[in-house]
Image: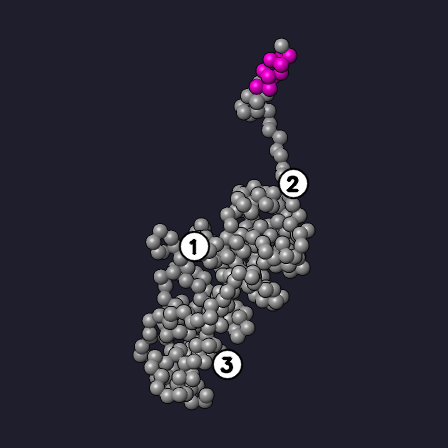
Amino acid sequence: MKKIVLTMAVLALLEDIANGHIRRERIFREREDLLANDDDWLMSRFRFPRPVLLELCAELRPALERHTARSQGLSVPTQVLTTLGFLATGAFQRELADRSGVCQSTLSRAMPAVWDGIIRMSSRKHFHSINVQVICDAQMQLLNIVARWPGSTHDSFILTNSMVGNRLEAGTVRDGWLLGDRGYPLRTWLMTPLTNPNTDQERRYNDLHSRTRIIVERAISLLKGRWRCLDRSGGMLLYRPEKVCHIVMACGVLHNVAHRHGIPLPEQHNPPLEEPDAGPVNCNPPRGAIRARQNVISSM
């Protein structure tokens, strides 16, 4: 008889909870201190060792710290590390939320703030794509990223309509040249390879041009190798194009952070050794640009 009475009492209690008569007590999962792990573990999941992660948290704290009376607010390290985990692996947010001890909806709300904070620190078939312009120096430090045009936009159009392109065209920067493949227009400030080199000097120019320009291809490969969310091996970014552009920019800033600290890439990463397809040849360059390129060739 006691067992029957107890069962009926439990059923009545569950019914009251279901009907909202009794408030269900919230149960918080214990959140793991991810920063307490060793550097090898942190590098494999977040691409940075503990000192750099602490530096990022300190730099991003003013943008991410929320003044709340809730004892279970999302901490700055949790926001930063779960976001880095996504950028590094392209893993779904549910997996990252489970590992961090936070619900997926909370993580989804936090990640855009981290991307914006990082940036302030410094359509094809069935899916959208973004054509990203990247300019780097000889050490593969990223100098400029433009991530706002659809994948169908031509490279030369992006450069022409970028701040860098406008400044160079106006002559405000005179020290050196940009190097582009044959899909870019030859300009006095933008050197492209010769289509049909005839002399030893011209062939040497093309060879040096190719060997120098491939540095940016390696930089892009390093960027995608470190932040797998940008690579197809990490899956597709299931976000609006505007948010994807923010993710690309954030990854670019973090690439430079890793470069500045001399942090190596994961062992499985192999940068390209050969130059990719140059694309369509751009004809009828201005005479001044032809003379500028010939002067470069003659000085070699």
Q: Is residue 14 above or below residue 116?
A: above
Mark earlier in primary sequence (2, 3): 2
Query: Amino acid type of disc 3?
Result: Asp
Identify the residue shown where x is 64% and y is 12%: 2
**Neighbours of disc 2 within 10 Å: few (<14), some (14-19), many (20+):** few
Between 268 and 140, the residue placed more toward the observer is 268
Point out the stretch of residues depicted in magenta.
Answer: 2-11
* Residue denoted by label 1: 241
Q: Which mark is residue 278?
A: none
Q: CA distance from mark 1 to mark 2?
A: 35 Å
* Residue denoted by label 2: 30
**Neighbours of disc 3 within 10 Å: few (<14), some (14-19), many (20+):** few
Magenta highlight on residue 3 = yes
Identify the residue shown where x is 39% and y is 85%: 202
Front of the two marks 2 and 3: 2
Between 92 and 186, the residue placed more toward the observer is 92
Compared across the picture, whether 233 is left or right of 195 comes to right
Are the residues at dot 1 and dot 3 in contact (C-beta closer than 8 Å)? no
Query: Amino acid type of disc 1?
Result: Pro
